[in-house]
Structures are given as structure tokens and as C-alpha cells.
Amino acid sequence: MGGRTMGRENTVTRRSFLQAAAAVSSVGLAACATSSQQSSRLWTVDRTSGKLPARGEFVVRNAYVVTMDPKLGDIPVSDVHVRDGALVAVGTKLNAPGAEEIDGRNRIACPGFVDTHFHLWGSFARGIVADGDFDYFPVMSRLGPVMTPEDAYASAKLGIAEAINSSLTTIHDWSHNIISGAYADADLRALRDCGIRARFSYGFSRDLQQKPNETADFNDIARVKREWFGPSSDGLLTMGFASRGAGDTPPEVYRKEWEFARSQGLPITQHAGRSLAEIKRFRRIEMLYKDKLLGPDVQLIHTYSASTEERGMIAETKSHVSIAPYTASCLASGLPYLGDLLKRGVQCSLSVDTTTVGGNADMFSIMRLMLQLNHLRSMDVMEVQPRRILELATLDGAKDLGIADRVGSLTPGKRADLILVRTNDLNVAPFGNPALLLVQQAQPYNVDTVVIDGRILKHKGELVAIDADEVIRKAAELFAAARKRAGGPY
């Protein structure tokens, strides 16, 4: 159950990593029954049935385990025991009679990655955003209103399938194309049907965005909470409120909306400080601070143009920040203030934002770019190190979404959200520092296995429960029809 405590890369010797890598690769063939010799019900399911795999009992044997638990640290040759969706134990040579076994040799086992801001509804809108008239905002303002609930379901399912395939076990569905309650239900059905862990934040529609004096549909928000998040829910999905907020609505509207959200116990998420264009119109963070609305239940998205004073306001109120480095770069929004925010003690996390702009739901690339952008912002390559970036994508993401008591680290007693990443592929071998491999070298291609709440949803490099070909076919068909209704030519 022990291991080396996590620390900065420069505190770990080259020799220790070479020894660890040798230990992982030298485990004998007899140490465990390999997954290639098995056809288990835990990772064998009819993809066309719409059913998820069973939660059962299995042990990952002889992996290099990166627990992200400060007490357990990294364990170079270790097992991970899962039963009925929970992490039972992490350690060497675990006794688990009757459990299925998964070969962890030449694999890193680590917590599944946590996205904290993803506009799933636009996932099928790929290859249409460029410059000028085809910029993201005008394109989506035309596409969003013509989408149907069926479109929303297919688009969300495409985004979720890619997310699971690439290593994400939790996403934050920032749903801001809710034309009616049927669109909220469509997103939630997609989340449920795919088996991913998620926060669903009930947002607004393109139409409501043009009506700043109208409030969100409080009745439908209450309905969704009652129908989808009642006592019978399995806990995989949680709910939040996505606000248009200060600047886009007058004070009497956003204050009323935030008061309602808090009366329902919903955490609030808000785009803020996204660009220089925004701060020429208003200083949203300052406005919310002066209204005494910021707090630990508030997640601010972006903050690239936040002033020194505003960053101090975020820290003072213990508000959270989600950073989307890919869309920050693609939309020329600005360089994130990650290092500065971390020094101030702000709870930060990482996000996809939208694949329409960012291209992919790829946390490996997001981590890599975040590290590089912070180097450019700070001009100090030591300010934030790869291990700290990995923490943002796992435990800090869970903290941001208020679920760190359940996931974010491989801690016995937590729910079993984990991934296995191959260490012997061409783009990552030979294996040395696990944090460097995950942050600076790995790609979704290297992800062998994805487990969410004890269900094996990807194994041996293939999705288990989702028919990817059918998901792609349906999304392409409906996207083509939606583009036609929107008038193209994008």
C-alpha cells in the first residue's frame, strides 16, 4: 500500500526511473493471466444493444501505478483491485481470489482525466470554423437554433465517445443550446447511455442570449433536477447552472438567476475574462465581485484577460478557474495566468471547451499545450512542472467539480475511474518519468483501457459499449441536414 510520495520531477533521480522501468518490464509471464487469454463479461458486450458492461470484480496486475494520492504516490510494480465500481486496494501482489485479471505490464495506471468545461452540443460541427464569416461564434449562432433534440443527442454522443476513447472519465457538459427542456433531456440521455461521469450544467439558448431581460427557465431547471438527479440516480451525473451572467444580462436578471441556482443547491459556472474584446465592454469578474456573488461554488471559465486585481478577487473569494488552452490559442484569446493563479491558491483545472474549435477531446494535448503556454506567460520553465499539470487533469479537475471525495486519485474507497496507458509504443518508449510520458509524449492512441465507475468502457484499444461507426454515421447524417437548414455554405 506504500509508495514514493509525489513531487517535482527534479527531485527524482534518473537512476530511480530506470530501475522502475526495468522492474515493470521484467515481470514474468506467469505473474498474471493476460487479458488476451480472456473473453470476460466485464469487457464483452453487444455494442448494438445499448447496454453498458457490468460492474464486477477485477485486478490490474503489475502496472506502474500513478495514484495521484499524496500519501500513496507512485508504485512502480503494483496491482489495482476493483469491485462493484469501487477501488478496493492498491498495492503489490494483492490477494483477490475469483477476480478477473488484466495485464498491466508495460502500462501506466492512473486516474481517468477530468474535463471541466465542454460544449457537447456542438461536437458534430467539425471542419466548418475558420476565419472571418466562418468564425466560431457567428457559425454556431446560425447552427444552434436549427438543431433538433435528435441532433443534440447525436452530437453529444459523438463528443462523449471521443472523450472516453481518448482518456476522459469525467466531463462537464456546459450546455448552452437548450432551446427547450427536450434539449436538456437529450444531452442527459447521451451522458447516461454512454456511461461517462459528468456534471450537466443547464444553460441557455441562442435565442435567450438575445433577450437579456428574460431569466432562465426556472421551472424546467427544477424539473430536470427532480427527474434526473433524484434519489434513484446512480451518482454518475451531477447538476450545475451555466450563467449568461454579468454584462450580458442586467444586474436584476443575473442576480435573480444566481439566487435561484443557489436555492436549488446548484454550483454556478460562468465564462469570464475570455478576451480583450470582452473587457472593452465590461469587467465581468469585477462586477460579480462587487455584487458579492463570487465564491467556492463558482467556476469561472478562461480568465485570460483578468487583471491583477481581478485575479486577487478570484483568490479572495475562493472561486475556481477552468482553463481551455486550445481554444485560447485558436481564438487568440490570450495567454492563461495559470502559474499566477496557482501561486494565489486558486483551484484551477483544464478543459476541452469545444471540439469545433479545439479539434479534439484530447487531454494529453491539452496538458502539453497548457505547460507550454505557461512557459511563454511566465518565461520560467520551472514555475509549473509536468507533475503539477497532471494533477490539474486529475485530482484538481475532480476538486473543481466537487467530486474529489469520489474520484481524481486511485485511493482505496473511491470510485474506480482509471485508465491504462501503454508505455512501449513508438511515441513513448523507452519508459522513464511517468509524468513526462503522460504530459509530453502520450496521445489517445496509447490509451489501452478506460474504466468509469468500475465499468470497463475501453479495452485493448477499442470501445466496449459504444458502436463508434454508428455514432459517426448518425452524427454525419444529422449534421449535414442541420447545415442545410442553417443555410450553409459552411
Image: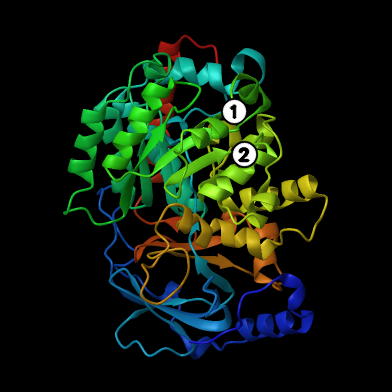
Q: Is residue 105 visible?
A: yes
Q: Quadrant of the C terminus?
A: top right
Residue at which label 1 appears: 283
373 w.r.t. 182: above or below: below
Q: Is residue 379 left or right of residue 189?
A: right
Q: Residue at x 49, y 21 (%)?
A: 140
The disc label shown at residue 310, or none? 2
Q: Which color mode does the image show?
A: rainbow
Identify the residue shown where x is 47% and y is 48%: 163
Q: Looking at this view, is 483 or 171 the one in front?
A: 171
Quarter of image, res 138: top right
Identified by mark 1, the residue type is Arg
Query: Where, by quadrant of the figure, is residue 451 drawn?
Result: bottom left
Residue 438 visible in the snapshot: no
For label 2, the crowd category at 10 Å Cα-Cα, with few meaning under 14, some 14 to 19 and many 20 or more, is: some
Q: Residue at x 78, y 51 (%)?
A: 375
Give residue 414's position: percent from left, percent from top: 37, 70
* Label at residue 77: none
* Badge 1 or badge 2: first in the primary sequence: 1
